[in-house]
Amino acid sequence: DGEDFDVLLRNADAAANRVKEAGGNAFQFYAADMTRQALDRVELENALRSALAQKQLELHYQPQVDLASGAIIGVEALMRWKHPTRGFVSPALFIPIAEESELIQELGYWALMEAVQRTAQWHAAGAWVRVAVNVSARQFRRDGFVQAVSSALQLHGVDPASLELELTETIASGRCACWRTSSGSACRLRWTTSAPAIRASPTSPACRSTA
């Protein structure tokens, strides 16, 4: 619906975006709420772009517990966004927006550096802990990210064995060998899907599949 060409085009874009969000291969008639949702999305994306500079992002660390012994064997770094007026924004809202743009690169790099720095502080205080950081497929495939991980570890003097990179979708195991750092050690990788876990141990140059 629309009274002129510009309105029709804008409404068609809104309907197309709704189809894309649903996974594609379908059609969708325009509804008035689509425009409002599109505007909300743009507003949220713009706010997210300035969130880093304004130090609104935080990492919360969730303990990883060994079920057999009850011992804490590591922590997972979870990104949280504390907006000045919205309060805490759900990751379910802002992570998909970041993943559809280059923002995920900036957020991912910030999370990596923040987590490695905190790991170094814990180690200096005598608490050895492995920290898991979520990595998007776009980050994983980007040229230069391997060097970014290696540089972060070297900058803060952190053992690669204490960093675990969690990937949210299956990627060919042949890519794992590239995660060996310049020191000859490798970060541990874990795929968080329903498929068998794939890991790269601190000493193994390649991946192995475990049930």
Image (cartoon, rainbow, N blue to C red):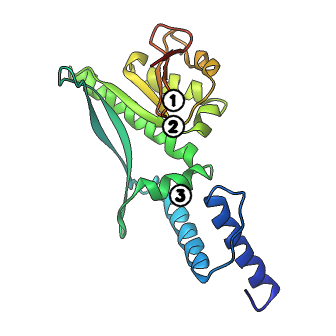
Image coords of residue 31 (percent x, y): 63, 80
Residue identified by numbered label 1: 195
Q: Measuring from the top left, give residue 2's x and y in whole percent.
A: 74, 88
Gap in Å between the C-alphas at discs 1 and 2? 11 Å
Q: Are marks 3 and 1 in contact (CB under 8 Å)?
A: no
Q: Position of residue 40 (x, y in %)?
A: 53, 72
Q: From the image, state whether disc 1 or disc 2 is nearer to you.
A: 1
- The amino acid type of the residue labelled 1 equals Ala
Q: Nearer the viewer, residue 183 or 22?
A: 22
The residue lying at 69 percent from left, 57 percent from top is 24
Q: Of the residues shown, which amino acid type is indicated by label 2?
A: Thr
Q: Is residue 113 left or right of residue 37?
A: left
**Nearer to us: label 3 or label 1:** 1
The image quadrant that residue 111 belongs to is top left
What residue do we see at 72% from left, 57% from top?
Answer: 25
For the residues marked 3 and 2, what is the alpha-carbon distance in whole angstroms?
23 Å
Residue placed at 51% from the left, 10% from the top? 183
Q: Secondary structure at mark 2?
A: loop
Secondary element type, mark 3: helix
- Badge 1 marks a residue whose secondary structure is loop
> Which residue of the protein is positioned furthest toward the right in this rendering?
5
Pointer 3 or 1: first along the chain = 3
Report the Cα–Cα distance between label 3 and label 1. Answer: 34 Å
Q: Which residue is mark 2?
A: 168
Mark found first going from the N terminus, 1 or 2:
2
Q: Nearer the viewer, residue 96 or 151?
A: 96
Question: Of the residues under marks 3 and 2, which one precedes in the sequence?
Answer: 3
- Vertical position of residue 138 compared to residue 148: above or below: below
Q: Which residue is mark 3?
A: 49
